[in-house]
Image (cartoon, grey):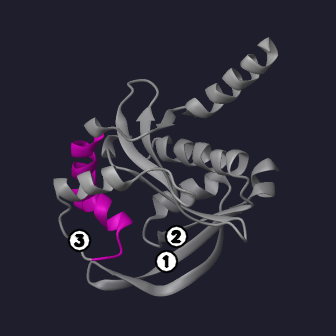
Amino acid sequence: MVKAKKTIKKECEGLEMLTGEKVRLREYRREDIQLAQAYINDYEVKRLLNPGIPYPYTYEDEMKWFESNSASKDNYSFAIETLEESKYIGGCGVNKIDWKNSVAMVGIFIGDKNYWGKGYGTDAMKVLVSFIFDQLNIHKVKLQVFSFNQRAIRSYEKCGFKTEGTLRKEIFKDGKYHDEVIMGILREDMRG
């Protein structure tokens, strides 16, 4: 009986904190809503995330997302928090899962530009991918990124993602068409 309690506690501790070297992935909290809205409405952040028209995102929009966003069989969302300051800086998650083919589609953003280019996004993506492979038993993780977002592409490559294809002139941004890059990582790529 004692052994079972220790095992359960150990398993729960492993899931409770999805922690990397710089960040922790945690649940979204009500106190994140206002900052999340500000991050998403920042022009530079929005142009790297959203293929649509850069229309302002309201507080009500963010509140609706927060209230309807709970883990489901196909969607897992995490707030990204720094380990040093416990500061909410962005988000990531599994946006869709094809259970039959064991493929997950992911997304990530670092909304606080003070943390851009410093390894926080790379660390968060490594933690997220490990969660997907180790807890969801998924075989492949994939994502889409705009070709002009070279910082993100380099980050994904550091995590082990490989370019699998390019959708030519798929996105219209800033007065011209851009490619969208499809990247993926297999479980065996991560395990080496």
* Residue extent of the magenta highlight: 32-52
Q: Residues within 10 Å of mark 1 (few under 14, many from 20)?
A: many
* Dot 2: element: strand
The residue that label 2 is drawn on is 144
Q: Is-magenta flag for residue 144?
A: no
Q: Are marks 2 and 1 in contact (CB under 8 Å)?
A: yes
How far from the left and from the top, in percent, is residue 166? 57, 81
Q: Position of residue 96 (x, y in %)?
A: 54, 65
Where in the figure is residue 23, as x and y percent of width and height? Answer: 49, 34
Q: Amino acid at mark 3?
A: Pro
- Tell me the residue that label 1 is attached to: 180
Q: Is residue 116 visible?
A: no
Snapshot quadrant of residue 97:
bottom right
Q: Residue at x 75, y 61 (%)?
A: 139
The quarter of the rendered structure image containing the N terminus is: top right
Q: Looking at the rendering, which quadrant does residue 42 occupy? A: bottom left
What predominant SS class does the magenta segment belong to?
Answer: helix
Q: Residue at x 51, y 58 (%)?
A: 75
